[in-house]
Image (cartoon, rainbow, N blue to C red):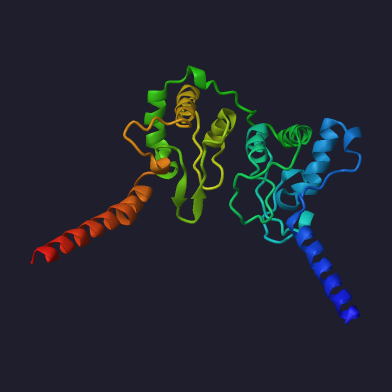
Amino acid sequence: MRRARIAIAATLLVLALAAVAYAQLPSGIARPDNEQNLSTQELGAQLYAGNCASCHGIAGRGVAVPGATRGAGNIKGQGPSLVGVGAQAAHLYLTTGFMPLSNPHEQPWRSRVLFNRRELASLIQYVASLGKGPPIPHPRPETGDVSEGMHLFTSHCAGCHQVAAEGGYVTDARVPLIKEDTPTQIAEAVRVGPYLMPKFSKKYISDRQLNSIIAYLQATKQPRDIGGWGIGHIGPVPEGMVTWFIAAVALIALCVLIGERLRGTV
């Protein structure tokens, strides 16, 4: 009996330790042991080799054939070339947590950034050194016009992101909430076009117009619900839910009440 109790206790202890280990997911980041002794360029190169090369190839040349190589985390590599993307794209994908992906076929999605500031700066600098490309932009939304920004955002972006910039869904993709993005990240996304989003050159959206769009997006962070209940600010979906689940129930209850009163008068 005593042995059985000991065996049960040991089993429970192993299961508990396994649950803790499972809950503490690994960061998935490969770091050099002598990180503090490396220069910015050396650190960036080693971080790239350990976390990016399996998908984006040696020296950022890309991996075209699925599963041709396996890298960090035994990931089957397949990714585009990074030659010439510049610091702009690297900053966007790394500071939002879009990269690195656990699966090259996943949609990049905002998540916790696993690199510290020095690692981010080093990795961005290394990617920028792979080929001449656009630098990190420095937008000035304080010079923009909110009204013009709303018009531009409605014309170019609201079809996916909603007028209130609350995100949404399109075919085979999720549309992110962009209110968490910094002005720099918004400017980068417009120029880079992450995932299925089209990219807009300065010919279609000038830097001045981009400043207005960012100014409008900053204004949407604290919306003024003058008309009443905002209901999430994502348009007809919550409004339809209110109609069916609140208004319809109230209407049925009213009909039942009227029916009971009419029955009492007969």
Instruction: State whether residue 69 appears in this view.
Output: no
Which residue is situated farthest in the bottom direction here? 1
**Residue 212 drawn at (x, y percent):** 45, 24
Q: Is 157 or 87 nearer to us in this picture?
A: 157
Q: Residue at x 82, y 33 (%)?
A: 41
In the image, residue 170 above or below residue 190: below
Q: Residue at x 63, y 33 (%)?
A: 88
**Residue 190 drawn at (x, y percent):** 52, 35
**Residue 200 drawn at (x, y percent):** 49, 35
Tell me the quadrant of the picture where the C terminus can be found.
bottom left
**Residue 59 drawn at (x, y percent):** 76, 43
Q: Is 188 or 234 nearer to us in this picture?
A: 234
In the image, residue 264 above or below residue 143: below
Q: Is 260 or 65 nearer to us in this picture?
A: 260
Number of numbered markers: 0
Which residue is situated farthest in the left direction here? 266
Tell me the quadrant of the picture where the N terminus can be found.
bottom right
Q: Is 112 or 211 nearer to us in this picture?
A: 112
Q: Residue at x 15, y 60 (%)?
A: 261
Q: Residue at x 66, y 43 (%)?
A: 97
Q: Is residue 18 left or right of residue 170?
A: right
Q: Is residue 209 left or right of residue 29?
A: left
Instruction: State whether residue 72 appears in this view.
Output: yes
In the image, residue 198 above or below residue 78: above
